[in-house]
Image: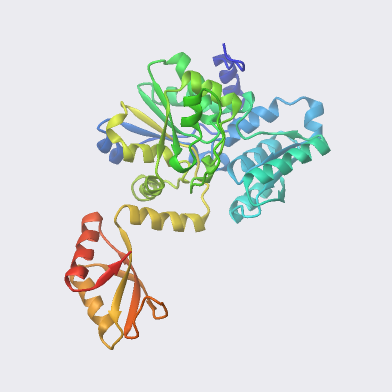
């Protein structure tokens, strides 16, 4: 028996509560991913949810469960984006005052959206952890109820409604892939799916650079990471929540990790082939399919948990994704510092059909001789084989190339 039991009746009650609040998000098939996996792949599009992520579900159920006295005291949360917006909208819909602490470096679109949903935004600290501590101090001083992003029973129950929708929309499902940070969404989906369909595998996916669940599951209790950093800020959590961890440890079928390259490739795939804007955290299940397409029994449902991505981050991630896919190549070439040398280099690139996006000269470097110059090149290429051909042609022409 769990210390925090979550029953199907709890989840079904939350589903009724969310009617008219959270959307039943669409389930879209992907021919490209289905061909890759060799089985049907469906995408549960929580990136199209109100506020741009699944977080509204849990936030609404949590705030709706507060007593009148607690509601009168208001709520407070800390987040870099998705939870902030979910709490702000849920509180506004329920007529509850909300305050949200966000890091100073939080993306401007997310700050603006949180304010537009009705929250008072306070910028504090350089990390979510610092904002979190400030929010907890505010709660103690003001009496406002702290709304944790994942470590509360009601939050998990709200997120579990995604699991019920998956079974309703894709009853033939055999594997569900879910991005994991603190574990609220994975725990909720497992709590909803496993009692009804114990044959369905529910698997979490974490960024390898911020993967607290694998060591925690191995230890049998939540373990804190000393260092963690990933482009997937929505799942950049250093320690699993106590409430979701027990459910994940009991019901889920493990947690896998994916590389930063795979996350950026998955985001790029979302734009190019799936026609969906997905943030890196939301793309984690797709990244798992790209890394290990043969290891999942189909039909597969990949949960796209969010679509809130800062345009500046998108620009960087897309460039990273293009490079990982062999579609973008950065290199440095050493030349003789004389007229015509650059034209000769560009002639070689023309022969191999590489499109030059940017050129910059580097003349001041202690490694260079008096008659040498280095040129930084950014090229648009057509894949890994084309990249190899470009590098080979340059070296065959006598150029010294470094990346």
Residue 182 against residue 390 in the figure, above or below: above
Q: Position of residue 327 (x, y in %)?
A: 30, 58
Name the residue rendered at 42%, 23% in the picture.
253
Q: Position of residue 250 (x, y in %)?
A: 49, 18
Left or right of 350? Residue 322 is right
Quadrant (top left/top right/bottom left/bottom right) for the C terminus: bottom left
Query: Quick one: 365 or 101, which is closer to the camera?
Result: 365
Extreme residue in the bottom direction:
339
Name the residue rendered at 54%, 15% in the picture.
8
Left or right of 98? Residue 239 is left
Q: Position of residue 224 (x, y in %)?
A: 57, 35
Q: How many marks?
A: 0
Q: Position of residue 386 (x, y in %)?
A: 22, 59
Residue 106 in sight: yes
Left or right of 114? Residue 279 is left
Q: Quadrant of residue 12?
A: top right
Residue 296 against residue 272 in the figure, above or below: above
Name the residue rendered at 35%, 47% in the picture.
269
Q: Quadrant of residue 335?
A: bottom left
Quadrant (top left/top right/bottom left/bottom right) for the N terminus: top right
Residue 30 in sight: no
Query: Quick one: 254 or 143, which is closer to the camera?
Result: 254
Query: Quick one: 232 or 75, which is closer to the camera?
Result: 232
């Amino acid at each position: 028996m769990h210390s925090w039991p979550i029953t199907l009746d709890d989840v079904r009650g939350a589903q009724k509560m969310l009617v008219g609040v959270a959307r039943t998000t669409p389930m879209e098939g992907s021919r490209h991913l289905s061909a890759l996996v060799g089985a049907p792949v469906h995408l549960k599009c929580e990136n199209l949810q109100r506020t741009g992520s699944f977080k509204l579900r849990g936030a609404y159920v949590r705030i709706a469960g507060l007593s009148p006295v607690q509601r009168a005291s208001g709520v407070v949360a800390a987040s870099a984006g998705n939870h902030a917006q979910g709490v702000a909208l849920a509180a506004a819909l329920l007529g509850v005052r909300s305050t949200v602490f966000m890091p100073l470096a939080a993306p401007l679109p997310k700050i603006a959206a949180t304010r537009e949903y009705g929250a008072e935004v306070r910028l504090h600290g350089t990390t979510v952890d610092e904002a979190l501590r400030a929010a907890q101090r505010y709660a103690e001083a003001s009496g406002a109820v702290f709304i944790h992003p994942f470590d509360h029973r009601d939050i998990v129950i709200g997120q579990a409604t995604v699991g019920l929708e998956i079974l309703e929309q894709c009853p033939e499902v055999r594997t569900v892939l879910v991005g994991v940070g603190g574990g609220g969404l994975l725990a909720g989906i497992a709590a909803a799916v496993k009692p009804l369909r114990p044959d369905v595998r529910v698997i979490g996916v974490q960024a390898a650079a911020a993967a607290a669940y694998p060591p925690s599951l191995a230890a049998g209790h939540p373990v804190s990471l000393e260092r963690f950093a990933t482009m997937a800020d929505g799942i950049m959590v250093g320690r699993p929540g106590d409430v979701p961890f027990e459910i994940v440890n009991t019901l889920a079928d493990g947690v896998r990790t994916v590389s930063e390259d795979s996350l950026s490739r998955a985001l790029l795939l979302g734009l190019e082939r799936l026609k969906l804007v997905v943030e890196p955290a939301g793309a984690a299940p797709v990244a798992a399919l790209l890394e290990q397409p043969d290891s999942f029994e189909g039909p597969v449902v990949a949960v796209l948990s969010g679509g809130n991505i800062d345009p500046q981050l998108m620009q960087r991630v897309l460039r990273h994704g293009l490079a990982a896919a062999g579609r973008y190549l950065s290199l440095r070439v050493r030349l003789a510092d004389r007229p015509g040398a650059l034209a000769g280099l560009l002639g070689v690139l023309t022969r191999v059909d590489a499109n030059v996006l940017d050129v910059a000269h580097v003349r001041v470097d202690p490694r260079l001789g008096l008659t040498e110059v280095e040129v930084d090149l950014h090229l648009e290429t057509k894949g890994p084989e084309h990249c190899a051909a470009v590098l080979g042609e340059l070296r065959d022409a006598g150029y010294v190339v470094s990346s």
